[in-house]
Image (cartoon, rainbow, N blue to C red):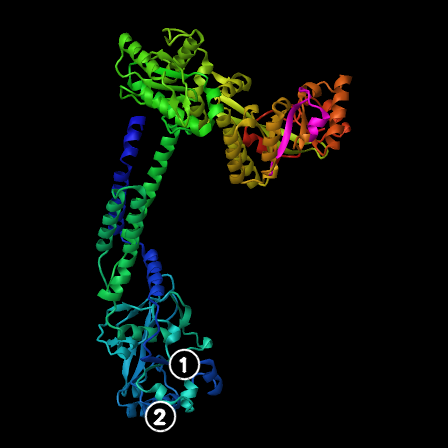
Amino acid sequence: MTTALLDRFLDRRRAVAAVLAILAGLLALSAGGGEGIERMLRGARDQIRAHPSSGAVAVVEIDSRSLRELASWPWPRRYHGALVDRLRQAGAHSIAFDVDFSSQSNPVDDAAFAAALARADGGVMLAALRQQVAAGSDEIVENVPIPELHDHAFLAAVNVIPDDDGQVRQMPLGLEIGGVPRPSLAALTAETAAASNGSFAIDYAIDPASIPRFSFVDILRGRVPAAALRGKRIIVGATAVEMGDRYAVPGYGVIPGVLIQALGAETLLAGPPPARAGGIWPLLLAFAVILAAMWGGGRPLRAALFALGAAAVLALPLVGEQYWGLTFPLPPALAALATAAVAALAFRGAHHVRQRALVDNATGLPNGAALALAAPAAATPVVVARIERFAAIAAGIGPVATVNLVHRVADRLGFGHDSIIYRVDEAHLAWIEPEYDAATLEERIEALAALMRTPVDCGRPIDVALTFGVADPVAAGASQQISNAALAAERAAHRGARWERFAAGEESDWHLSLFTELDAAIAAGQIWNAYQPKLDIASGRIVGAEALVRWSHPERGPIPPDRFIPNVEAGGRARDLTLHVLRRALEDAAGWRADGLELGVAVNISATLLRDPVFAVLLEEEIAAARIPPSSVTLEVTESAAMKDSGEAIAALNSWRALGVAISIDDYGTGQSSLAYLQTLPASELKIDKSFVTDLSTDARNLIMVRSTIALAHELGMKVVAEGIEDRQCLARLAELGCDTGQGWHIGKPMPAGEFAALVAGPERAAA
């Protein structure tokens, strides 16, 4: 996708998200499915609607206590007859047995039970069921009570049919058993008309624990008051665990089958179960929510509309079940809402990333990368305005006022034409010249210079002088055109001119393009970290690495650090580069730890950042967000940097040390620091410069210097790192001197993160 197409796509991201959501909802509606989500939502609604049973249905339990007191199961059927008589005498509304009486027992007991049923005069329901002969068999057996029993009772289907996940959610209204349509026990108990092929959803908002329960033996022995049974619709069934009649249900785990029968009867007594409406209605509501949220004003209002609308969609079945006798399937609507939310967040994130890549972080103005994207569409020159003495002005007024100053200057540069003003570097603003001819361009520059004669008010009046550079489009691209214009502005300033045009065919110093290439190179992965191993000399183990920045330029090839780092620092971009190296090092070290390699990592800090308060804040944020302990991070500062402006340097180092990181004084020996000064530094290690280490075995003076440095550092409680170890003899001599850590090509050259991890994780190396 081209840049222009990508920008147009992201500009229409809300419309694209809405279309994707509508398509997802319609696809989910046509495909069906989402049963698992629907079941989960139904369970949540049941929890919201939770309430006790009406108490009209009661269970007489064949429980463990009854089994103990009345001998082993099956009981003599005269017990069941006696129970029927007791319940009738107490005034029970109806009596139903969830017990299988399909086989003959003792004739005397069968006759006693039959007589009790006859005395009940049709007020008793007995169980009939269909079941497989064996698990996995297609053969069905139909169990009905023996004739002498069912002649005096109604037969009711007691089948409980779990769903594919093993949980019971539905109950038949009736089944055909023995060639005869039989209403279900729940339907007969509730006295509801039932078809032989219908079913209904059990209302699990009813708490099974609230259903009245009485022990079989207590009723049989007269221990239950008649008032407790009067008017109840009684269902008799097993609750003892050893009887095995238990099923999994939503929200309550495993419960006895007789309780499921009671819940079914309670469901039907409450009225007709909710009918299932079409999924199109919640889907249409979801569409309305999405459209309102996408075009509902500002982002907070859109988020509020989406949240309220999503809540309304989720509440629709709850309201329908409670007041309208309808339930609505939600998966299509939820698919649409989820697609809209994910797409909107993804597109917004992409747009944000796109905008950040094209915006100057400090001022919010479009940056050099944005200008480079816009310039190819124009055949006109790029003009760069250079703010003279920018570093001195920024140091004098502070960062907040500096941002205001840049904005005020940009406003003046845009006066009189509609061009976008870009901040291509800290001290350079630029624009694409809209209508070019030499005379009008010179007039415009002179007019802008005249505007700048008035001080810029950024909290206090500041005199600002500008010089201008102009460059025509070149075959090397927009980045080079910007660099050419910046070079022309710099040359104009050096010779005291108002502006200068970059001469056609002139070869500019490539370092000037750093300012427009640096961010793009970081984003493209062209600027990366190499890691040089650090060896614990005493144990011979690699314990960490120093992160060394590298630039693999697509046109110029590998660029040595000493060719670009000084220019980055001179151009005020050390903060961006250092934070990139630090962030990458922290991520790589976290990756090593995830692989079981607990390694430290050291990062070089530019001397210019010791006096940068913004860097101090950003450093604290990066260390706090890191996924490794701060104690495994070392910040290296050169000896000369620590000595310069010592008060500020010590304050900065103390603030960094307070973050929990280690401080290393790099290149020790190249400066003129004294013992007294070293004592003031919050350093945890000294790093001896390689110029003293490489020929340690042959140069007596260097040997003396290294020996004394190691002794001095240890006296001050610091460890010592020696860099520049090129051979085995040097490493052996450092071990004799008690040096703690070593670096150098003999131990390992700088390498990519993956190669370094493989080196450490590989077979143990003989370091000596």
| Magenta residue check for 662 | yes
**In front of the other: label 1 or label 2?**
1
Position in image of residue 24 (x %, y %): 27, 46
Residue type at tag 2: Ala
Q: Can residue 2 be seen from the camera position used here? A: no
Residue on which the image places disc 2: 112
Q: Is residue 545 left or right of residue 587?
A: right
Quadrant occupied by the C terminus: top right
Please name whichever residue, 299 or 757, is drawn nearer the observer in this view of the structure.
299
Residue at which label 1 appears: 61
User: Helix, strand, or loop for circle 2?
Assistant: helix
Residue contact between numbered discs 1 and 2, judged by CB atoms under 8 Å: no
Magenta span of residues:
660-679
State the image coordinates of residue 155 (x, y, percent, origin top left): 28, 81
Q: Evaluate whether residue 52 shows in this view.
A: yes
Residue for point 21% across, 75% down: 193
| Residue 163 numbered tag | none
